[in-house]
Amino acid sequence: MDELLSEFVAETQESLEALTNVVVALEADPSDRARLDQLFRFFHTVKGSCGFLNLPRFERLSHAAEDVLSDYRTGGAVPDPATISAVLAVMDRIGELCVAVDSGDSLPDRNDEHLIATLRHCHEVARATREEGKARADMSPAGGDAASRAAPASRTVRLPLVLIDQLMNGVSDMVLARNELARKLRAQGRQPETDAAFERLSACIADMRDTISKTRMQRVDRLFMAIPRMVRDLSRELGKTIALGIEGGDVEMDREMVEMVIDPLTHIVRNSIDHGIETPAERRAAGKPEAGSLRLSAYQSGSQIVIEVVDDGRGIDVDAVVAKALAAGAVSERDVARLSEQEKLDLVFAPGITTARQVTAVSGRGVGMDIVRANIERIGGVISLTSEPGRGLAISIRVPLTLTIIPGLVLNAGGLNFAIPRSAVIEILHDSNPAVSVARLGGALTATIRDTRYSMIDLEEVIGVPMAQRPGPRSLMLVRSASGIPYILAVSQVENHEELVIRPAAPVVMAAGIYAGMTLPDNGQPMLLLDAGGIAQVARLPLVAETVDAGAAREDAADRRAASYPSLRFIELTGEERAIRLSLVERVEDVPVEQVLTSGGHCRVRIGDRLVPSPHPVRADQVPPGARVVTCLRIRDGVRELCYPVHAVVDISEVPVEMDLSARYGIVAGLVLIDGRQVEVVDGFALMAAVDGAAAEEAARQVRCVIADADDMWNREILAPLLMQAGYDVRWRRQDEPADEGDVLLVTAGEQDAVAAPDGNGPDGEKAVIRLRAHAAPAGPADTSIYRYDREALLGALSSFDGERRRA
Amino acid sequence: MSTLYLFARIAGTAVALRTDEIEAVVRLKEVSPVPGVPPHVAGLSALRSRVLTVVDAATLIMGAASAAPPWPDTGRYAVMCDVGGHSYGLLVDGVDDIAAIATPPLPLCGRVDRAWEPHAQGVVENDGRSHFILSIARLLDHCGSAQAA
């Protein structure tokens, strides 16, 4: 019985989570029968199961909701916002009850009846209103996008996380055993047969590790799950209208990571609605659409997930932020004078100046942003802002794909090896570098790099081990402290770069304050992960801001790195070895061959329920016989994406920026040498441009077509699709809306409402007009109209306006 | 009802550890030192894919004065256990026996060394010899607080 009960609770909670968005979407489009049915089925299921489990309160609540919804289903009427709020309240109560049942607590009973009464009342009122035939106002179309993806359809099983962790450990054991075996085999010299068998085993283990790692991944959907409901509740509370857009839900990230990002993301979204987006009246006054737009998106970029929150609100008032920072003493007047705009903006992250009340009063923004940043940075992420005052704010969060596997640097100090997260290190220099000078003053070390002074500390001194005598220069690492101010950590040597599986260290080790965890690299020697922030604290480094110069140093470091960039090497289906910039590759995926389709000369790949363009098809003779999947690179330029089928992925290598350009042709930008081999570098621009020529053209269109008569069937069904296909933005003319510069008006000649505006291509601001006629022959010599099925003449006329507009 | 004990020696003293706290007894060939932590943390050691935090029981109980001897080539015995989700290896001098003892723990008698007083929870007899009963969880708890002090 207990098992049944806990399964019921788990299932109900899961459905509730998925359904919240359905309700919000239903509110946006109350006539959506599919969502109404989905909701009805939920209550019906709950009612059925809890009758069986003897949970009377669940039963009463779900019964009431089912009743009301059933009325809407059979009556064909559409629910109103008040009823939906009441349904949401019932769902919340069911959620609370689930928690209570799960923990064995009891929840006060008396409110249930109140909720049910409210629901019935709302329903009655709505019915009465409906019968009076009163028209209801349309709600803004919000959240539709999110909810359409909310319905889970795939077959799944529920597994305890412990089991997955055990599997993961088992696989790690296998990898270690394999490495040991590899060492022993190498020691015995070459034995082709054994080696071949070992290679096979190796490949199997690698595959298995990948698969198991995937079980830790979760769609970002879950991160966005709570957003539509929150946006809805907040916007009602604050009297704002918000159009929410969510995309990129099929990107995957580590389960734990999702948990860690939810809070900061919620905070940011709340800020955007509360302080960023203005009230409808303010927006009207500012000449913006009444409904504020809030867009959340997620995509993968290399080994990071980028989550962006973009609103079109009032942005951040930089001066107010600076004033606040000055008042709080976080910066001095002198510092401010040297800060760039972006660095001033970043002051919202400065600790101490952004306690909720103070900043809300002044700048109306930045509530607790220091905490948001601290949380993001704790998981190795980076947060950045782009604000356009009056036009909106874009916040982008970059976090690593997983918490447990991070790119790290292995370093040596006093004869011991340590690791440090790659993300904590800004730059590495040798102390023999002429750009560096180290000074010792009263025991304190200071390093000056390119005119910027930094606190410096020897790692050996922090950990209390003697400095190992070894030839060669020491390495100085410029690392980030917890407060964001960098300092120099000196070590004997930085050895190499490795992907590290991080696990928590025992409390007694963590208590030292300088470690962030431990890791077991492939050589089987446990290693500790250093905590750069902790070291600065333990060493009691005075971290005073020389913000401007630190910023400059960061840029320099970026310049330096730009001499080469990481790229992904792969083998084409046609056999050539090529490389593509890694940052363009969103991920690598095996796609079933039958999902690669060609139609109308364009090749597309079906991913989930979308079609993604592909630069070339997969011919049957290009895949090994019997192969069912083809490896695809998912490439994204920030806006468009495409799917690039390849034979195999080779490796990731650093590719020099300079290449032999004489080899340029088609999508190949040039040749580079990698490990002494010639590798063709794929030109990301040419690739994107080649795949979607039409789309590229579309971006360049500057003319908007306004069709005069929206009721005409021909205009609607034939003309509009033709124009849209040609890449034009099509609008229907409204009486109250003044024509914008750049509009072309299309009217059908002989219409009664013949337009007063004369024909013309008005550089003088006059609207351009194209007249269409229904007959093939012109009505007379003065007739400049175009026969409506003369596609070439029509598009020709439009593109001449387009060209003019662009010249103007 | 009898309790199963592991009989071992720590700093030359006979001790009894309840087996339900123990996962295994292993011989550790080497440890990676951890600088910056109290002296009773001997280091880290990998056991297959697990990483043990190795705690020297003798140093923990007797204090830093009884400095750990150099690591012998043959390795040292460690009692492996899991406390608070972390794996530990508790270094002991040696392991003698595992036996089920039916009699309940006896109270401490005589003047117990100050070092042992906080840890010994009682006495059990095995093979005619007395052993201090130690709780690994409490011992390792102490390992954290000893550092805080």
Image: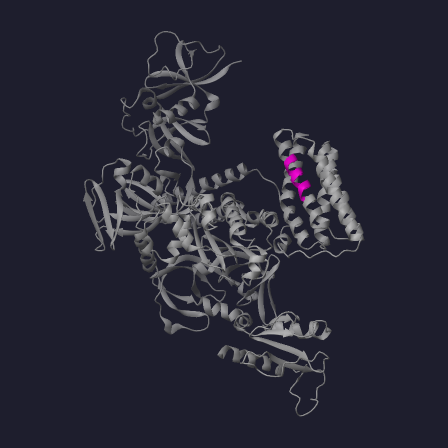
Main SS, magenta region, reads helix
Residue A542 can be seen, yes or no: yes
Q: Residue at x 69, y 31 (%)?
A: A109
Scheme of colours in the image: one colour
Q: x, y (%) of residue B115?
A: 33, 16
Q: Is residue A667 above or below residue A413?
A: below
- Is residue A94 part of the magenta span, yes or no? yes
Of the 4 image quadrants, the one containing the C terminus of chain B is top left
Q: x, y (%) of residue A487?
A: 30, 46
Q: Determine the image quadrant of residue B46.
A: top left
Q: Is residue A211 above or below residue B18?
A: below
Range of residues picked out in magenta: A88-97
Q: Is residue A347 left or right of residue A784?
A: left
- Is residue A50 part of the magenta span, yes or no? no
Q: Is residue A686 above or below residue A31?
A: below
Q: Is residue A38 left or right of residue A533?
A: right
Number of marks in the rendered image: 0
Q: x, y (%) of residue A190?
A: 36, 49
Q: Determine the image quadrant of residue A759.
A: bottom right
Q: Is residue A780 left or right of residue A225?
A: right
Q: Determine the image quadrant of residue A507.
A: top left
Q: Residue furthest bottom?
A: A781
Most foreground residue, A263 or B123? A263
Q: x, y (%) of residue A403?
A: 45, 44
Residue A44 can be seen, yes or no: no
